[in-house]
Image: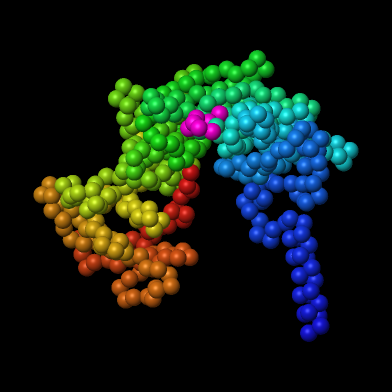
Amino acid sequence: MKAIKKSAFLCMVVILCMLLSGCSLLSTGEELLRAPKSGGEVSEIKEALKELITGDYTLKYPTDGDYRSAIVRYDIDGDGEEEAIAFYSTTAENITNMHIAVLSKTSGRWKASKDAQTLASGVEKVTFCDLNADGKNEIIVGWSVLGTVDKQVSVYSFDGTLLLQRAEEKYTEFLCCDLDTDQKNELLVIHLNTSEQMGTARLLEITDAGVNERASVPTNGTISGYQSVSVSKLLDGKTAVYLDGKKGSGLITEILFLSGENLLNPMFDIQNGTTLTERPFTDGVRDINGDGSPDIPMHGVAPGFENMSEGEREYITKWCAYNGKGLVVTLTSITDTADGYYVEIPKPLQDKVTLLTTRDGKIKTVSLYDTENKKKGDVLFKVKETRKEDYTPEDGWVLAAENAYTVLTVQVSGYGGAEARTAEEIAKTVKFFEQGEKSK
């Protein structure tokens, strides 16, 4: 009993010390994402900042991206020692300026470089990328600007002493990529001009002489923003950037890649202002079949529902990948995005089936469909979704997949035609998204 009381007392002392030192038992994302390693280092870095800054300042936290701390640790110059990158604001004559400073530790002491400042209201995100192939990472910062939807991206180089601004551009999204696979990264900057409903993607190279625009291409400017931007591969192995843009209640997907010296966007019809991949749902690109190339979910109205209203329609999804020349179907499925699963339709059954979902969305019935006579035929199988806490095995239903929250089971009908499948065969085609693919 005394040992227990002593342990409890020691725990209370530790907690009290943490609280008094400003530490939290529940670390925030900002603290976990590359923040300084100890309270002592935080104090040392802040003291070094005070030597640099005249007057009051406020530390500013990035609101997006992988690094959310106001003081980010990263080995910029590749010497094996991490620098500290600090973001803060100052106010003079009612004008707020954002600042970035790099601090290095020499002989056990932190010292700040001369900072760089910009007229902005906050930090959206920061990333690191070697843009000039010198073995040192540039610091790429996205700044938010008060009173405008436009943001600005700045590129900085640090030579160990000086922090130099190499570029500044308006942006909606940006990312570092090597589209020409020459082992030298470029900066892709995408900007939406919402007032003119025009979009542009520019591929920029950073050189000692300044910024060089390698190539550019128009993008769909009628969207409200981007759900995701990612770098991946086309089916032919070429590096490409995939843009999932938010349009109304749905999405469009644009694909950007280099062909020679030209930046292409084959999904966007510039003349008509339309995008081939526009769809009424918010399903983004996924590598649905695990081949390393993202697939775009194209939802087609299920047979027999063409004349139904939007709320009554059923959909069958054709997942399409780009091979450098056009879209090809890689997988066909019944897709339930809300509950995170899909049912692959075997090739012999594609374009021969339709489905019907119960009003509560828990049971999907797949039936044959006579396209010539436009008539629904025999039921092939059903898929049922059950909350895991409510699940009990039922006669005639075969377990197909389960996760922490949901159990999926299948039941086959008594149909004996050539299209019939066993429950075990159907069960293998039922997958949660995290089982069968990699989200982008």
The spot of residue 150 in percent (x, y) is 50, 30
- Residue 205 against residue 304 in the figure, above or below: above
For the record, the magenta segment spans 146-152
User: Quick one: which residue is furthest to the right in this view?
Assistant: 107
The spot of residue 87 in percent (x, y) is 68, 37
The spot of residue 107 in percent (x, y) is 89, 38
Residue 428 appears in view: yes
Instruction: Name the residue nearer the viewer: 348 or 337.
Output: 337
Residue drawn 61% across and 28% down?
A: 119
Magenta stretch, overall SS = loop
Residue 83, quarter of the rendered image = top right
- Residue 154 against residue 373 in the figure, above or below: above
User: Quick one: which residue is furthest to the left in this view?
Assistant: 373
Residue drawn 63% across and 17% down?
A: 210
User: Quick one: which residue is furthest to the bottom in this view?
Assistant: 1
User: Quick one: which residue is furthest to the top in this view?
Assistant: 209
- Residue 128 against residue 348 in the figure, above or below: above
The scheme the figure's colours follow is: rainbow
Instruction: Name the residue nearer the viewer: 88 or 260.
Output: 88
Residue drawn 57% across and 17% down?
A: 212
Q: Let me know if residue 343 is in the magenta part.
A: no
Residue drawn 77% across and 80% down?
A: 4
Residue 3, quarter of the rendered image = bottom right
The spot of residue 215 in percent (x, y) is 50, 20
Instruction: Name the residue nearer the viewer: 325 or 75.
Output: 75
Is 69 placed left or right of 319 in the picture? Answer: right
Residue 46, quarter of the rendered image = top right
Is 138 placed left or right of 344 in the picture? Answer: right
Q: Is the N terminus in the top left, top right, bottom left or bottom right quadrant?
A: bottom right
Residue 265 appears in view: no
